[in-house]
Image (cartoon, coloured by chain):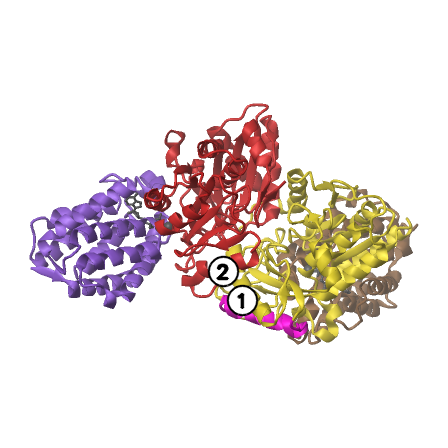
Chain colours: A yellow, B red, C brown, D purple
Amino acid sequence: MKKILNNPENYVDEMLEGFVAAHPEFYRMHGDSGKVVTRAKQAKSGKVGIVTGGGSGHLPVFTGYVGEGLLDACAVGEVFASPSAEQMADAIRVADQGAGVLRLYGNYGGDVMNFDMAGELVEFEDINCTTVLLADDVASAPPEEHEKRRGVAGMVYAFKLAGAAAEEGRDLEVVTAVAQKAADACRSIGAALSSCTVPQAGKPTFDIADDEMEMGMGIHGEPGVWRGKLRTADEIADEMMDRLLADMPLASGDRVSILVNSLGATPPEELYILYRIVKQRLDKAGATIVMPLVGRYATSMEMSGVSFTLCKLDDELEALLKAPCDCAFWRVG
Amino acid sequence: MKKILNNPENYVDEMLEGFVAAHPEFYRMHGDSGKVVTRAKQAKSGKVGIVTGGGSGHLPVFTGYVGEGLLDACAVGEVFASPSAEQMADAIRVADQGAGVLRLYGNYGGDVMNFDMAGELVEFEDINCTTVLLADDVASAPPEEHEKRRGVAGMVYAFKLAGAAAEEGRDLEVVTAVAQKAADACRSIGAALSSCTVPQAGKPTFDIADDEMEMGMGIHGEPGVWRGKLRTADEIADEMMDRLLADMPLASGDRVSILVNSLGATPPEELYILYRIVKQRLDKAGATIVMPLVGRYATSMEMSGVSFTLCKLDDELEALLKAPCDCAFWRVG
Amino acid sequence: MTLAKADLIEAIDRVTAAMERDFDELNAADGALGDGDLGVTLTRGMRAISDMKDDLPDDFGMALFQCAQAFTKSSGSSYGTLMATGLMTAAKTLKGQTEFDAAQISNLVAAARDKMQERGKAELGGKTVLDSLDAVAQATAGLDAPDALADAAAQAVDQALDDIRDKPATIGRARIFGEKSIGMDDPGMLAMQRIVKAAAAR
Amino acid sequence: MTLAKADLIEAIDRVTAAMERDFDELNAADGALGDGDLGVTLTRGMRAISDMKDDLPDDFGMALFQCAQAFTKSSGSSYGTLMATGLMTAAKTLKGQTEFDAAQISNLVAAARDKMQERGKAELGGKTVLDSLDAVAQATAGLDAPDALADAAAQAVDQALDDIRDKPATIGRARIFGEKSIGMDDPGMLAMQRIVKAAAAR
Ligand SMILES: Nc1ncnc2c1ncn2[C@@H]1O[C@H](COP(=O)(O)OP(=O)(O)O)[C@@H](O)[C@H]1O
Ligand SMILES: Nc1ncnc2c1ncn2[C@@H]1O[C@H](COP(=O)(O)OP(=O)(O)O)[C@@H](O)[C@H]1O
Ligand SMILES: [Mg+2]
Ligand SMILES: [Mg+2]
Ligand SMILES: [Mg+2]
Ligand SMILES: [Mg+2]
């Protein structure tokens, strides 16, 4: 196991300890349930709160995006496991500045069940909650069943766009509508070349030959649409763009942002080789690229592979994308 | 080979094409020799230029650190190979704003020979050049022969500190002195868990068993001080800190910055687990940590492993560290 | 025949041991159809329960409540949350009792199944742990002799796997496999087979 | 006996083929003591030379100058830069000649060795490519018969490896190995053995 760790049982706790120690200007721990991260400087009273939560092992997702113009708090689970309902309730409580809280997270069974339970807990405390689920992974269900799709890197756009709306002082209804619009505007697809290893499992989640890849794989190693011989960067980029554009066709003049994301081990060098084709494809479609993102934004620890997320913008979303934000992993403006 | 690429021969050219396309606000290509990257917006006339150069495969090092408050230009080589003297001469030419140019790069034979040759070329054009070499890897030679050490992630501090001095308008002599002071203030050590693969070689540079690590390895897979069973994060961090502090003892009250750097595949989660111990060790030594850096700052493509760089600050260096800088990978202020 | 705290503690020991034994197997089964953490979830949960077993209250409801909490705190994966939901349901029914009649088992399992269904919104027959619980609830209905109960439950979890194996997964991470999951066991049903058999000492 | 462009082109073909053949071996030798790119450096350089061999000028000096440039442009690794330096030195001597006397070979190699030493600041005996060139320069001194020259050069590069193998590396990435490099061949010397033998058709 090519991992640097102590007792796997303590992986997440020790990680969080180092995380807040390294970035005290951005993050602090909150509450008794453990593993709840909130902004170092609480947002101003009356701002709509945005919370997320999910398993560990995806940094900067989820907790890295707590910050100004982004999230207010995050409940952090064990690796690839949902946080508990209690932690989520604590995250909701600290995020609430009296204007209600949006729960914005990925469409995974464990997270949905626990956020539902958390909602039942905070209802007693009269905290007004809404929910928007990310379900952006086109490989995980056909368009007719898009609400069953997994939530992957589209989250990053949703955090940014909803976060900007909240920071501007919009109310819960508007922030929720923006988040839903952002979630609806995103389509993602991933391709993996190697597995990651869940620390406590101690073995790679799946086996894949040295010359193989899997198209459409999820960020926890969930199955994709085909497995076969590793293709060239251009072929991979073309197929991924084909799949995204088939799901969300672009017309000439459309404005989009695109995230070319490493799942972990894949270095930026390879992302740029892919971006070359991504840009050619979008240019050819007549679309204008706004603020492309190339890097590690939503990962699966040391998995090799990439994902693309296409986010179609209207004027409102474009302005929100360009609005300032600040956290240890992403700064705009 | 778990790499996403087309023809390995075109790896660096395609990478650079995507790189400048993704970040046109920061970078542009310059000159006829190819693979020279400079700032999108040229620095103001009279500013001392700072150039670097080296092999590809280390992003953000080298070319990622071209930017305001950092470098002016970079000559980019093939993976792990020095750029040619002609490219370096082009980088020096575009960096020169009439106040001379500092060549600031790592102590590797190929780079030294080529930067020397480049110097001979631009001498004819009356560009005043100075040189500062990074030789910060304590594992690569004993203190008595410290000038023979390899240059590794200490580069990041040297770019930042010299870059800030140049941006403030100091002259070549002062900028060179600052760079030398920065280089002298840095000590680094790495530990690798797996090899990377040079695209054209197509095979891992070295073999290492799944349960092994190598302490002291260089960023191209150069040998370290021991190879053995993988230890725990705490043991690894302790040994690395022991080695750094033995080479550059700290006294209570000292102010330092520390970079906990992934060599590529190692995810931020593991860096934070290590940072936990790093901070404990520095706290115990009575040192104050200023602006710790945790992330991927100097890599070896998809190598698993980490490096620590300790940078001892005086008032001048601390002010320069906190001065603004901006590039696609690092922003301060 | 009635069951008391000593029986609970023995069952905890057997289930904990079974989960340690099947750690790799359950991770692998979940790795094939999901994210590879089911063994982790169950060993973590059972270790947490095992650690506090000597301090469990005599009140059966309170004891199961604490077991449910152990699952909630140790893991938020789907299975952990569903286990907590099921245990909590039984805890509510048994609150205030220091022992209970084995004849209640069928009803307790059925109630857990229903609450878990409400929480996870899966259908019966959808190839999830619900199908194993449903089989147990049905097979144990009307029984109260310990051996007969244990035999019926153990047989039911085996049978459920056989009955459902050739259906496609419809829920959770496995859903995406669709037709490809035909012929494969649902990891959650496999886990429930091991849990029930260990609890029943079969 | 004199050498002309046709001989150069044949030598280029043989060296190019040898570098393709030894690609993995040279990468591996460099991987063991350095960064694993020596095979890459040499195949890139020789391919670039090979690609332009039909357009090489008849002037030997100009031809070698272009070969040197091919190395400079195709790779900046230490070895590529040193090869370019050595070729450039020979190019300067031979400028204006369309053929040259084989008896000059020893002097040409010695001059290349000296310029490469100036560029790389390594000592003789320091376990680098310089030691191979030094051995060739000495062994070929006074010879001008093609077979005798080829034999002497081929023997010299073998002998140099044997003589130096048990010394420690002192320069470049391999230096750090120190005592551990005793008994291992310097990748650059190994490469020069293959280059010289291929050039000499031995
Ligand atoms: N919504 C649901 N309803 C019922 N059972 C479910 C549901 N989701 C998952 N399961 C069961 O849980 C098992 C997977 O558990 P687990 O590995 O904890 O899930 P995850 O890691 O995806 O959160 C499945 O095999 C299935 O039996
Ligand atoms: N300064 C030097 N002087 C002479 N020979 C050198 C020098 N540095 C390296 N070499 C030779 O070059 C070989 C390594 O070449 P190469 O792989 O291109 O180096 P790198 O990849 O480190 O730039 C060594 O084995 C040695 O023979
Ligand atoms: Mg899980
Ligand atoms: Mg090299
Ligand atoms: Mg699972
Ligand atoms: Mg080399």
Check residue A277 in the rendering and tell me which mark sits there, or answer none: 1
- Where on the picture, by quarter, is residue A41? top right
Q: Position of residue C136 (x, y in %)?
A: 80, 67
- Where on the picture, by quarter, is residue B285? top right
Tell me if residue B322 comes above or below residue D62 in the rendering.
Answer: above
Q: Nearer the viewer, residue B286 or B230?
A: B286
- Which residue is rendered at x = 11% and y = 50% of the image? D140
Looking at the image, residue B245 sits to the left or right of residue A37; the answer is left
Q: In the rendered structure, does residue A234 fall within the stretch colored magenta?
A: yes
- Which residue is rendered at x = 27% and y = 65% of the image? D52
- Which residue is rendered at x = 10% and y = 56% of the image? D102
Residue behind mark 2: B17
Amino acid type of disc 1? Ile
Q: CA distance from mark 2 to mark 1?
A: 10 Å
Q: Position of residue D171 (x, y in %)?
A: 31, 41
Residue A117 visible in the displayed image:
yes
The magenta segment is: A229-252
Q: Nearer the viewer, residue C108 or B143?
A: B143
Q: Residue furthest top?
A: B252
Chain ID, mark 2: B
Disc 1 under 8 Å from ligand 4? The reply is no
- Where on the picture, by quarter, is residue B7? bottom left
Chain ID, mark 1: A
Amino acid type of disc 2? Glu
Tell me if residue C183 comes above or below residue B236 in the rendering.
Answer: below
Tell me if residue A107 comes above or below residue D166 in the rendering.
Answer: below
Crowd around label 2: few <14 · some 14–19 · many ≥20 (10 Å):
some
Residue C185 visible in the displayed image:
no
Mark 1, secondary structure of its residue: helix
